[in-house]
Amino acid sequence: MPTKNEILAVRALRNRKTRSDERKFVVEGLKGVDEALSSGWRVHGLYATADSKAPEEWGADRVSTKDMSRMSSLKAPPGILAVMGMPDEGDLDAVVQHPAPFALAVDGISDPGNLGTIIRTADWFGVAGIWVSRDSVDPFNPKVVQATMGAIFRLPIWSVDLPETLHKLSSQGALIQGLELAGQSLWTFEEQAAPASRVAVLGSESHGLSEEVREACSEFIHIPGGGQSESLNASMAAGIVMAAWHATSLSAQEQN
């Protein structure tokens, strides 16, 4: 059984600064924890209630339903919880050498569900990685982690000074494309010869791209539509851009 201090230590990981300082975060639910244990990332703690479906071979510490509720950040705790160590952030220049040279950057995305869905979709399409601005929601926020459905363990994600990082990538030859309504049609761009490496930058639904990020962009693109809505959901827009890139990549592979 976990001690009172252990329970408080897990609860403390709801705080972004605590997660950052300790390089730890929480994963909940059978699928998420299974992905976490298979990832090779460091496990700092593993807890399960008696009525959970945690396999015996996991060796999880048994906790009461009451203690699990104290540790969990969810309204309906699934009864399985792991405390994981964050990975090293690694090489921020990896995109320019990646075999599928396309990455995503998000600027000021505040909704955990949106960021989690973006991460999950990026994993599906084989995106090289995601740069997240420091004023966005934390990628290791419990709600973001939950929404990724395990994809957070398979995709490089970097929390960075986004304008500085984009300028650096641009100087190394990457094409930085900001999404905004005044940009070139995404469909027209995808018909052109693909650049050596590319980063698509998505802003928040309410404010768009920050001025500092706009200045770091090489060009701008937009997603043409035929309806009356003012804008797309951020995760939906990101998914369309990633799908268009992936279709172009498949077409190029078939021609080679």
Image: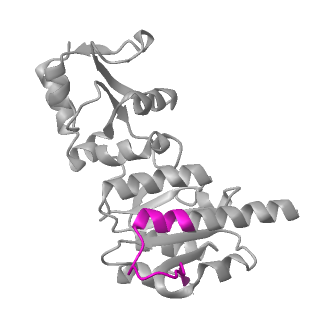
| Left or right of residue 167, residue 27 in this image | left
Q: Nearer the viewer, residue 145 or 84?
A: 145
| Left or right of residue 23, residue 244 in this image | right
The magenta segment is 219-240
| Location of residue 50 with respect to 96 vertically, above or below | above
| Left or right of residue 236, residue 142 in this image | left
Residue at point 50%, 78% (across, down): 178
| Location of residue 90 with respect to 166 vertically, above or below | above
Residue at point 40%, 67% (across, down): 233
Q: Give yes or no for residue 82 being in the magenta stretch.
A: no
- Quadrant (top left, top right, bottom left, bottom right) of the C terminus: bottom right
Q: Position of residue 75 (x, y in %)?
A: 19, 38
Q: Position of residue 161 (x, y in %)?
A: 38, 67
Residue at point 80%, 65% (across, down): 252
Q: Position of residue 244 (x, y in %)?
A: 63, 67
Query: Does any portion of residue 41 appear in the rendered image?
Result: no
Q: Position of residue 129 (x, y in %)?
A: 54, 56
- Quadrant (top left, top right, bottom left, bottom right) of the N terminus: top left
| Location of residue 111 with respect to 188 vertically, above or below | above
Query: Does any portion of residue 166 appear in the rendered image?
Result: yes
